[in-house]
Image (cartoon, grey):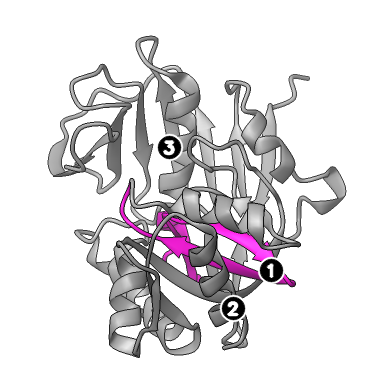
């Protein structure tokens, strides 16, 4: 009897499965479920590794346009309503992975091509599936660097290059008791009781920080470069806009966008959000820490 190769992972309290031979991915190892834990948490999706996808006509739906230096994802639709995702590490490069996804985003098949980075393709497929399958579960994949201090998590937001990781490193250097949770893609979760928690994930950008840990959210801070240090608490509407700008998701999927909107709306009303205009110095980290930890 041939046993099916299956790996079950648990992220932010939810499970997903990968079936079939997959590239070695050490970033996933901390999230691997032990056999006795495999039934814990709701199963979000199942991804099957396949040697090829069906040759069927596809209608283009959406292509990301994040610009040079960012991956490109082209989304199409099969006649049966399923979606096809084609992932390139950079615009103009060969497709490294193509995936067929059921209309409810709970079942998918992934073909890794021989021309691209297989590890990159697998992890991008998992990130996409996790974001889509959890859209109505109170989960958000955030583009953020997050530190833990005093039993709480502090998320630093901002456009690429504005200093999110730099500010985290300043906390690590100058604020005692600080630990990095994730440096690029933590999971922000609205809990059933209305509180918010932030979770480490298998995806952390260029910094290998893959921790299966979680803490209550202390604050969310948007970083803006400035020739001075100043921190401002945001009202709810501006907090919503700040959170939305850093939440992963494809707005053309209206039914998913509605789920993300409800989560963002609740988080903006309950989580302290700030803008920190700052220099990359110790004083900025001290100002931020003293403000967000004192409410």
Q: Nearer the viewer, residue 87 or 143?
A: 143
Q: Nearer the viewer, residue 112 or 150?
A: 150
Q: Quadrant of the N terminus?
A: top right
**Of helix, strand and loop, which one carries label 1?**
strand
Q: Position of residue 19 (x, y in %)?
A: 60, 32
Q: Is residue 38 above or below residue 22?
A: below
**Of helix, strand and loop, which one carries label 3?**
helix
Asked whether the residues under the numbered discs 2 and 1 touch, taking CB atoms below 8 Å apart as contact, a structural biologist would say: no
- 10 Å crowding of disc 1: few (<14), some (14-19), many (20+): some
Residue at the disc numbered 3: 124
Residue that appears at 27% across and 31% down: 69
Asked whether the residues under the numbered discs 2 and 3 touch, taking CB atoms below 8 Å apart as contact, a structural biologist would say: no
Q: Nearer the viewer, residue 35 or 152?
A: 152
Q: Which residues are magenta?
A: 131-160
**Of helix, strand and loop, which one carries label 2?**
helix
Residue that appears at 62% across and 87% down: 193
Residue 11 visible in the current orientation = no
Task: Compute the Cα span from label 1 to label 3.
Answer: 25 Å
Q: Position of residue 260 (x, y in %)?
A: 36, 70
Q: Position of residue 158 (x, y in %)?
A: 35, 58
Task: Compute the Cα span from label 2 to label 1.
Answer: 19 Å
The dot on residue 66 is none
Residue at the disc numbered 1: 215
Residue that appears at 76% across and 62% down: 177
Query: Taking 209 as reference, is 245 left or right?
Result: left
């Amino acid at each position: 009897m041939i046993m099916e190769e299956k790996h079950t992972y648990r992220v932010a309290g939810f499970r997903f499965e990968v079936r079939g031979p997959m590239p070695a991915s050490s970033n996933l190892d901390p999230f691997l479920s032990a056999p006795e834990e495999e039934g814990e948490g709701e199963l979000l999706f199942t991804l099957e590794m396949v040697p090829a996808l069906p040759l069927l006509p596809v209608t283009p739906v959406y292509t990301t346009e994040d610009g040079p230096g960012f991956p490109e994802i082209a989304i199409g639709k099969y006649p049966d309503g399923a979606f096809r995702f084609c992932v390139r590490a950079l615009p103009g490069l060969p497709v490294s992975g193509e995936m067929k996804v059921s209309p409810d985003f709970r079942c998918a098949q992934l073909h890794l091509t021989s021309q691209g980075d297989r590890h990159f393709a697998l992890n991008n497929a998992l990130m996409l599936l996790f974001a889509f399958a959890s859209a109505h579960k109170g989960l958000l994949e955030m583009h953020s660097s997050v530190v833990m201090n005093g039993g709480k998590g502090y998320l630093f937001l901002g456009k690429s290059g504005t200093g999110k990781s730099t500010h985290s490193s300043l906390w690590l250097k100058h604020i005692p008791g600080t630990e990095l949770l994730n440096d690029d893609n933590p999971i922000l979760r609205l809990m059933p009781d209305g509180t918010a928690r932030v979770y480490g994930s298998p995806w952390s950008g260029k910094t290998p920080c893959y921790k299966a840990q979680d803490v209550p959210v202390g604050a969310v801070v948007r970083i803006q470069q400035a020739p001075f240090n100043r921190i401002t608490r945001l009202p709810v509407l501006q907090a919503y806009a700040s959170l939305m700008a850093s939440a992963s998701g494809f707005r053309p999927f209206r039914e998913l966008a509605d789920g993300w909107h409800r989560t963002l709306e609740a988080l903006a009303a309950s989580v302290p959000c700030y803008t920190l205009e700052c220099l990359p110095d110790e004083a900025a980290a001290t100002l931020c820490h003293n403000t967000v930890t004192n409410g």
